[in-house]
Image (cartoon, rainbow, N blue to C red):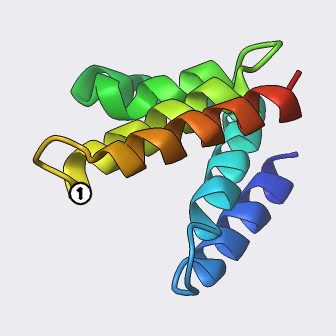
Amino acid sequence: MMALGFLIIGLGILIAPLPGPGGIPVIALGLVLLLRSSWWAKRQFIRAQHARPKWVYPFRRLMRKKPEIAPVFWQQALRAEKVVLRKRPSRQLIRVRKRARRVLRRAFR
């Protein structure tokens, strides 16, 4: 399982330069597999958790027995949007966000 985790992380790094967010979810999946099978990785994860809790929290939510996939990705999308758009979002962006949320809710029920 540990080798599969490293392989998936490597694949995500190779995919990362391509357009779109393709590499990020693949790397996250590889990290989850690696953390579930390696004590060394768990120790490093705990150290990272103490150093940067906001960055590690989404991975902790994905590692639960019944992971909340849609809410985690939604939260990360909102964080990324907040970084990109410093000012108040437009009405059109709010409508798109609501529509995307409805689609995600239907897809992951």
| Residue 91 in the image, given as x and y percentages of width and height | 33, 43
Front residue of 62 and 4: 62
**Residue lying furthest bottom in this view?**
18
The quadrant of the picture occupied by the C terminus is: top right
Front residue of 93 and 8: 93
Residue 40 can be seen in this image: no
Question: Does 94 sit above or below residue 92?
Answer: above
* Residue at image coords 82%, 13%: 66
> Would you say 84 lies left or right of 45 here?
left
Looking at the picture, which amino acid does disc 1 mark? Answer: Val
| Residue 105 in the image, given as x and y percentages of width and height | 76, 26
Question: Does 55 sit above or below residue 1?
Answer: above
Residue 38 can be seen in this image: yes
> Would you say 91 lies left or right of 28 here?
left
Under tag 1, what secondary structure?
helix
Front residue of 77 and 103: 103
* Residue at image coords 70%, 31%: 102
> Would you say 22 lies left or right of 45 here?
right
**Residue lying furthest top in this view?**
65
